[in-house]
Amino acid sequence: MADQKLKTALKWFFRCLVTGVVLYYLFLKIPFSEVLTALLSVKIVYLLPAFFLQVIMRYINACQLRIFTHQQKMDFSAFGLMKINLVTQFYGLLLPGELPGSIVKWYRLSKENKMRAQAAACIALSKTVNLLCLAMLGIIFFLIEMPYDSAAIAMSLIFGLIASGLIYLSIINGKVFYRVENFVNKFNLSKVPVSFQEKIGKVWNSMKRFREFPISSINYTLFLSFIYHLAGIFAIYLLMEAINIDVPAVSIIWIRAASIFIQLLPISISGLGVREGTFVFLLSNYNVSAPAAIALSFIIFGIRVVIALFGGILEAQNLFFKKSPIRK
């Protein structure tokens, strides 16, 4: 237990260190006064629709997640799942990386019904579908534009596409599912704790339910994912317009995809530092100044914070005012 706490503390320290070092380096090279000037010149008229698009994205994600939870016989409404998404985002501001946020969502989904394996299966498939669609959009539009020779960006998008595609097929397609299962069974798992094997086995068995999906439901979840990402792309476009960043629409699509994949790396707090550095690097090829790129990143983070605060309010209601369970 003590070793686990030490490892957790060291991870927190490392991520805080990375966040601080990257931000310090950026502001060492880029005067903060110029970033502040860019932020003060923001056109408010573009911020409100961008904000509401971000809220709509959370609802779309909840609608998609409801399809998965319904397949697992879990009784949630889309509105109840949206509340869980907001509370998860609130805790995501405090937790480093994607995994801790997913654990919070898993806890919320399984808190009342104790269907822990089913909740984990739903979250895994939801993440996979959204990353699959994101990678598809990113690689297609990166290859269409080919703005410059960047093998690293292309390979990261291709890797994301292949990895998410294989995971998706292994869940949905029965033949692929059993091939993966047989492949895993060939390994000697005697050194893996039995309790851990049992938990993974329960999640894997819950995944089997998704193979019963009708084609119409599979297509609908993919459709919702594309709508989710299109809303995110349009929101980024509006924010760029708000601070006078002129970038082609094709470029916005793959830049957004690349930045999201990079932020999946659990090396900073809420993506701070990593997101700013990514935007500075990618947008510099379109003659976008570093202060403007950092201002864009801060606005994106600011909208995320405001939305997360709604989740904080919901959590406060549940903790202090004993409201009915969040799933209602």
Image: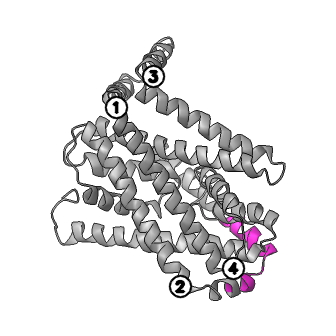
Give me the C-alpha separation between circle 2 and circle 3: 56 Å
Q: Quadrant of the N terminus?
A: top left
**Badge 3 density bin: few <14, some 14–19, many ≥20, Cα 10 Å:** few
Q: Which residues are magenta?
A: 20-36
Q: Which mark is residue 192?
A: 3
- Count of number-bearing discs: 4
The local secondary structure at tag 3 comes to loop
Question: What type is the residue that disc 3 sits on?
Answer: Val
The residue tagged 4 is 244
Residue sticking out furthest to the front: 216
Q: Is residue 1 visible?
A: no
Q: Mark 1 sits on what residue?
A: 210
Using the rendered view, name the quadrant where residue 154 is placed: top right
> Does the stretch in magenta take in 34?
yes
Query: Which of label 1 and label 3 is nearer to you?
Result: 1
Q: Earlier in the sequence, mark 1 or mark 3?
A: 3
Q: Are marks 2 and 3 in contact (CB under 8 Å)?
A: no
Q: Please name whichever residue, 268 or 138, is drawn nearer the observer in this view of the structure.
A: 138
